Image (tube, coloured by chain):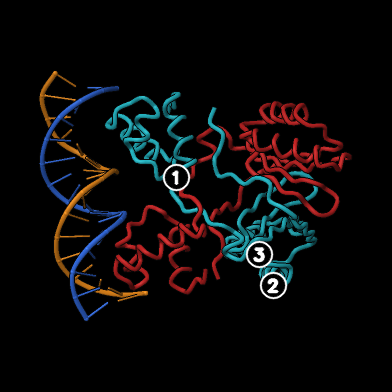
Chain colours: A cyan, B red, C orange, D blue
Amino acid sequence: MGMDAIDRKLVELLQADATLPIAELASRVNLSQTPCWKRVQRLKEEGVIRAQVALCDARKLGVGTTVFVAVRTNQHTEEWARQFVQAVRDIPEVVETYRMSGETDYLLRIVVSDIDDYDRVYKQLIRAVPLFDVSSSFAMEQIKYSTALPVR
Amino acid sequence: MGMDAIDRKLVELLQADATLPIAELASRVNLSQTPCWKRVQRLKEEGVIRAQVALCDARKLGVGTTVFVAVRTNQHTEEWARQFVQAVRDIPEVVETYRMSGETDYLLRIVVSDIDDYDRVYKQLIRAVPLFDVSSSFAMEQIKYSTALPVR
DNA sequence: AATGAAAGGCGCGACAC
DNA sequence: GTGTCGCGCCTTTCATT
């Protein structure tokens, strides 16, 4: 699965705009359409490119508020973890979840319309799975949000 | 900019897979192609759908490690903020940045290949702008990552 | 605001070089 | 790797209700 400079450039371009036609991509990497198309095809087959999605405006969808939730548990069991993972996957307002090192066991990013809406999601979460400690931090402003991963 | 149930369904579908052809979308929302196409067009014009991008596999791009960085400053000036925003926007490894309420002033999500790589980005960041306090937390595992916002 | 038909463009894949 | 070609699907528009 060796990616050369051209592959990386294609990934960079498609991460920025997946609507670029093959002809446009080809000229940007100084290739003709056929080899360019084959490269993109290969990147998809290999799973380097794993999806093509529409990104929406959070405010316009009424979920302009981001809350980070640090979670601690006192039940370090397989069963609890399985339940927790299921719970966050089932709640669409939870858009990101990470198992952390250090003090907090899990870090969640949640998008909601306002504080009342957050309370609703919070209750939904603690009802689904017992949590030892929950610490919520509100984001005042989203400074940067990029789905484009660095390719060097 | 009133979104009805059909619009929301379209947004939901396109957030999951933007390669769905109009004909397929149309049948899923029980419309024919033309009105379905017009709705999607309108959602793009209004900026509800703001981009269409390729999502990549972080591991396969060699950036499988996520680090959350909590930043505190002691210079609460316009000029410092401007510099900081520019710095995080210019560093591609910084994929998300939020201005927070509470203890930490800013929270960054950074993707890197390993700890050494993180050290490189860390040095790049503190060289670009003076930081009063920096606290790094490593993610052990990404449990959930969704670019799809909830639409209810 | 909906439908069905039709035109034009582009992705896709095969071919020779 | 490059260029060419053709099929078919998909986007986009038009006429109509």
Could you tell me if the residues under marks 2 and 3 are in contact, i.e. CB atoms within 8 Å? Answer: yes
First of labels 2, 3 by sequence position: 3
Image coordinates for residue A91, horizontal then vertical, percent: 60, 65
**What subunit carries mark 1?**
A
Q: Residues within 10 Å of mark 1 (few under 14, many from 20)?
A: some
User: Which label is found at residue A120?
Assistant: 2
Looking at the rendered structure, the secondary structure element under dot 1 is: strand
Question: In which quadrant of the rendered view does residue C4 lie?
Answer: bottom left
Between the residue at mark 2 and the residue at mark 1, the CA separation in whole angstroms equals 33 Å
User: Which label is found at residue A50?
Assistant: 1
Image coordinates for residue C3, horizontal then vertical, percent: 25, 74
Question: In which quadrant of the rendered view does residue B112 lie?
Answer: top right
Badges 2 and 1, same chain: yes
Looking at the rendered structure, the secondary structure element under dot 2 is: helix
Relative to residue A124, is residue B88 depicted above or below?
above
Q: Which residue has dot 3 on it? A: A112
Q: Residue at x 37, y 40 (%)?
A: A45
